Image (cartoon, grey):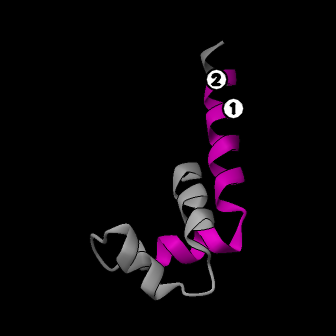
Amino acid sequence: MAASIEIEVTAKAFQALADPTRLSILRVLQQGTWCVCEIQEQLPKVAPNLLSHHLRAL
C-alpha cells in the first residue's frame, strides 16, 4: 500500500514539472528566494493570474 502511495506522489510531482512555464519558474527560484512580483519581472510573458496558478501547482 505504501509503495502505491509513493508512486502516486511521484507521478503528481512529474506532472507538475511537465509544464515549460513551471520549469522556467523553478529555474528562477534556483537563483534564490523571490517574491511573486520579482518572479513576474523575470517571466513577463506569464500573466499574473497564471503565475499564481503555476506556483500553486508547484
The three-letter code of the residue at mark 2 reads Ile
Name the residue carrying label 1. 8
Whole-Å distance between the Cαs marked 1 and 2? Answer: 5 Å
Can residue 30 be seen here?
no
The 10 Å Cα crowd at callout 2, few under 14, some 14 to 19, many 20 or more, is few
Q: In percent of the image, x 53 and y 84: which residue is there?
A: 43
Along the horizontal axis of the image, is 35 left or right of 43? left
Disc 1 is placed on an element classified as helix
The secondary structure that dominates the magenta segment is: helix
The 10 Å Cα crowd at callout 1, few under 14, some 14 to 19, many 20 or more, is few
Magenta stretch in the rendered image: 4-27
Q: Position of residue 15 (x, y in %)?
A: 72, 51
Q: Is residue 13 a member of the stretch shown in magenta?
A: yes
Q: Is residue 44 above or below residue 26?
A: below
Q: Position of residue 44 (x, y in %)?
A: 55, 87
Q: In percent of the image, x 62 and y 35: which residue is there?
A: 9
Quadrant in which the N terminus appears: top right
Along the horizontal axis of the image, is 47 left or right of 55? right
Name the residue carrying label 2. 5
